[in-house]
Image: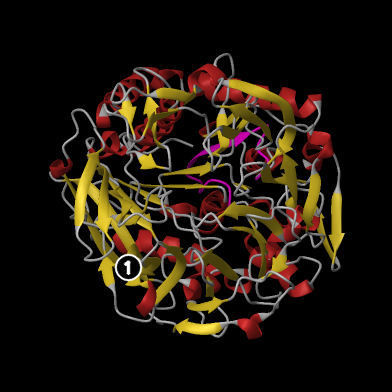
Amino acid sequence: MSLLPPQAPQRPHEHRQHDVVRPDPFHWMADGGPELVAHLEEERRFYEESCRPLAPLTAELREEMVARLPEAEASPWWSRARHRYALHTAPGSEYADLVRAPLGSPDGPDAPTETVLDVAALAAGTDFFELGVTLVSPDERLLAYSVDTDGDEVYTLRFRDLRTGADLDEVVPRSYYGAAWSADSTTFFYTVHDDAYRPHQVWRHRVGSPADQDELVVEEPDERFALMVRGTRSGEVVLVRSESRDTGEEWAIDAHAPEAPPRSVGGRRPGIVYRSEHVRGGPLLVVTNDGAVEFRLVSTPVPREADQDHTAWSPVRDEEPTERLERVDAFATHAVLSLRVAAEHRLRVVPLDDLAGKGTEVASRFPGGEVRLARNASYDAPAALVVDQAHVEPRVWSDLDLADGTRRDVLREEAPGHDPERYVTQRLTVPSTDGTPVPVTVVRHRDTPLDGTAPALLYGYGAYEYTFEPDWDPALPSLLDRGVVFAHAHVRGGGEGGRRWWLDGRMEHKQHTFTDFAAVADGLAGTYVDGDRIASRGLSAGGLLQGAVFSQRPDRWRAVVAEVPFVDVVSTMFDASIPLTVNEWDEWGDPRRRADFDWMLAYSPYENPPQAGTRPDLLATGALHDPRVMVHEPAKWVARLRETDPEWSPRCLFRVETGAGAHSGPSGRYGHLAYEAEVYAWVLDKLLTGPAAS
């Protein structure tokens, strides 16, 4: 390659902790500023010039991916008291608009719709656009909505009068996810994050008053905890939740008395988390790990006059060790339990008068798929809307009869030209190095053999007890159609195997995440896929996974895609001023403690570059405005890798967003697919051509 990659300046700097000296010549990048931006712009230019030969393939892939999107889209309707609502995407639009139609109209389902929120118009002229909250008030006369136009997850909150279509004068300039209306539609609760992007306050806004007169409702001083607020389907209770990685507390506010003080539902105890749902006119149903690793269900009165602790709880449904109980949703006659069973997301419907009963289990109709509740605004509905999908199966929405468990399909997502029958999805199990069986979801074209000859892309995450669900992906068939096998390794640290699966992949057990991933690749190699042509991919904490296996097993990969990777682990976790540091000590460890410092230092990709001459091709990504993984982390890592292996350096690319852009990439349905086309073109170039020259 004739192009020369950027060479970042090195400046002497040393970290000294626990009698360990860590040289950090690229520490200056953490200060940001014009010099860093200039360097990032050089990196972007090098990426674009290096990938110029891939432009025809990228364009071909994007055209295929976009062709699988319908020109116009519509979601299922959900009903409120006076209107039904849906999301409609106009032909060729990047974004879906919020629309509604009156209930009880003589035109019935053909009643004319009105646009409640023209999202495409709001996004016009922006380089990035993301909606935060969109909540219609109980009387359906107001809409609260928030927008982010930089990708930094700072949302401007506004209120729209739906009778006139005009926004009210009051504007909240800084808000976050989560919000709720009072029952009388006069008061709105919202969250605010601090300078470290931790949601630490819940505020109360009175419609018609200036935002500077809003009142503080709850403030969380402990930096390990983050706040969230939401309404309940019953419409009678507003819930405020504060959680760290393993401890939580929740408060209830009477939605009919929005100025009433919040009351604790169960106090706060180290290691105990709980989340509540309200039964109209009755108790709160609480999902908790109190005495149950995989969680159980209890009930408790709604606290109104004073705080209460866990002694007010009454057992309802015992823990099932083979099921992770994730949440409960209450309807007029039944509750719907969301479960993780055998690495799959399922539902169980139980009557409110028999919450401990067997009920009706609802599983995905698709191999390797997931089924979950969709948007359900009506508490009294006899059926709940559920959505079912898989990697190569577009979404199907169904009405789930709560009484008998039968499903009636109401809408199938269109995917022009896509035939799911051309693909095969199956679940394998591969033993990790300690013998733990690790589930793997494998997707391939029906004509691609699983006999050790096909190339593969292996995906992984493995953190926060979070699961990347098998969502329908209109980009994936373009990879599969070219003979590449897609495999998703459900490694420890994620939530696929329940709470225990997470506990065995966090803190001092974090190395399990990395060894699981490499073990899956080893188990697939030769027997199922071509061991010389395996690429890997992961985002954020999954980017850390990619950085770790890039360092620990460079021989295993033909290429690695590390998206917004958390790779400067030790320095980041020492810096409490960086977003998501203090409240993540319970996930990775607190490096002020020597034991925690040692295990993080052992796997931190920045401190552990692989030996020169052994490295696969690398594509890293980042975004200047990313509030979750600061852009200096991948920038420092790329600079360190280049500096320690100059001959390999041109094979390391850094695709960085220097303007507006988010943690998860460009916004909009076409913008996101254009990004996917770039990544897939790079991966295919590595997998379907000969080995790269050093």
Q: Is residue 103 visible?
A: yes
Asked if residue 158 is among those painted magenta in the image, a careful observer would answer no
Q: Residue at x 50, y 85 (%)?
A: 315
Residue drawn 73% across and 26% down? Answer: 37
In the picture shown, does residue 91 fall above or below 297? above
Nearest to the observer: residue 10 or residue 34: 34
Residue 175, given in percent of the width and then of the height, sits at: 70, 40
Residue 586 picture location, percent across and down: 68, 67
Residue 373's x, y, as percent?
37, 54
Residue 559 sits above or below residue 124 on the image: below
Residue 295 located left or right of residue 371: right
Examine the rendered structure and indicate whether residue 425 appears above or below residue 481.
Answer: below
Locate residue 218: give its quadrant. Answer: bottom right
Residue nearest the viewer, comparing 45 with 496: 496
Amino acid type indicated by mark 1: Val
Question: What colouring style does the render use?
Answer: secondary structure
- For disc 1, the marked residue is 349
Q: Residue 416 versus residue 490: which sits nearer the camera? A: 416
Which of the two residues, 192 or 224, is positioned nearer the viewer here? 192
Q: Is residue 626 magenta?
A: yes
Task: Examine the image and state in which quarter residue 353 appears.
Answer: bottom left
Magenta span of residues: 610-628
Q: Residues within 10 Å of mark 1 (few under 14, many from 20)?
A: many
The residue tagged with tag 1: helix, strand or loop? strand
Residue in view at x 59 percent, y 33 percent:
145
What main secondary structure does the magenta stretch of the protein show?
A: loop
159 sits left or right of 613 in the view: right
Residue 648 can be seen, yes or no:
no
